[in-house]
Amino acid sequence: MGYFVVKKKDIEDDKIVIKGKEFRHIKNVLRLKITDKIVVTTGDGEEYHSVILKIKSNFIVAKISKITRRSNEPGIYVGIAIAPPKAKRMEWFVEKATELGVSEIIPVLTKRSVVIPGYNKVKRWEKVAISAIKQSERSILPKIHEPISFEELLDNSIVFPVRFIAYEKQREGVLEENLRGNKATRVLVLIGPEGGFEKWEVKAAVDKGFILVTLGVTKLRTETAGIVALTRILAI
């Protein structure tokens, strides 16, 4: 059964209109036919189990037979605030974090950041995330923010009851140990750039309620650290 993503406006009553890339994938790649079953999501947690009714030259109409809510989603909301790494390593992070179950990705600009993403980069990451929820059959599309400053991140982080900062020079305080027994449903992890955090950034984060944690004895790449932190939280 195919799994596809559409916009909310493409659903009216019990009908779904599928256009663009998803239409071409259904018609030209999968070669699905009328009466074939598909699952459609808008990325907001609902899955529309549907049957193809019409296949036209540039769109498909499907009829909704059942709506389910939030299958294949973790029970905890995890945000990863990350200083974007170079080249396509950020795309790799967005793809894998989305597949695993991240809820929110916040690109943050630190003192030692080497990449300052523009509008086109963010749009590209959103497309990568859409492909990843199809691959993993998630029903919620992670929110990918526009890049914000380190100071803005700290000010906005209060919406997360539990906040961690992963610091390569920290030798105690394993992330999982700080979460076991904690009933928080929203967790934020702050991951630094390739060159690491400045000492004043670490202090500023701690002053805002972030807990210093280590992700292990080895020094990890930025994108690897983000994935390690995410998987450890979701595994608890």
Image (tube, rainbow, N blue to C red):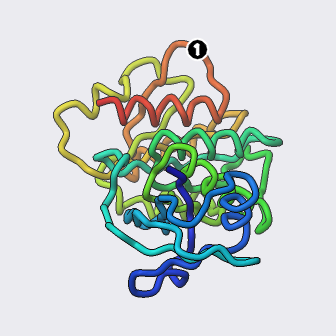
Give above or below for 178 relative to 219: below
At 42% from the left and 34% from the top, the residue drawn is 212
Q: Residue furthest front?
A: 34
> How far from the left and from the top, in percent, is residue 21?
72, 65
Q: Nearer the viewer, residue 192 or 130?
A: 130
Report which residue position mark 1 lands on. Answer: 218
Is residue 66 shown left or right of residue 170? left
Q: Amino acid at mark 1?
A: Thr
Q: Nearer the viewer, residue 174 or 51?
A: 51
Q: Quadrant of the C terminus?
A: top left
> How far from the left and from the top, in percent, is residue 124?
74, 59
Q: Residues within 10 Å of mark 1 (few under 14, many from 20)?
A: few
Q: Nearer the viewer, residue 151 or 117?
A: 117
> How far from the left and from the top, in percent, is residue 193?
68, 39
Q: How many marks?
A: 1
Give above or below for 127 relative to 207: below
Q: Residue furthest top?
A: 217
At 61% from the left and 73% from the top, the residue drawn is 18
Image quadrant assignment for residue 196: top right
Is residue 103 shown left or right of residue 21? left
Is residue 24 shown left or right of residue 18? right
> How far from the left and from the top, in percent, is residue 171?
45, 18
Image quadrant assignment for residue 20: bottom right
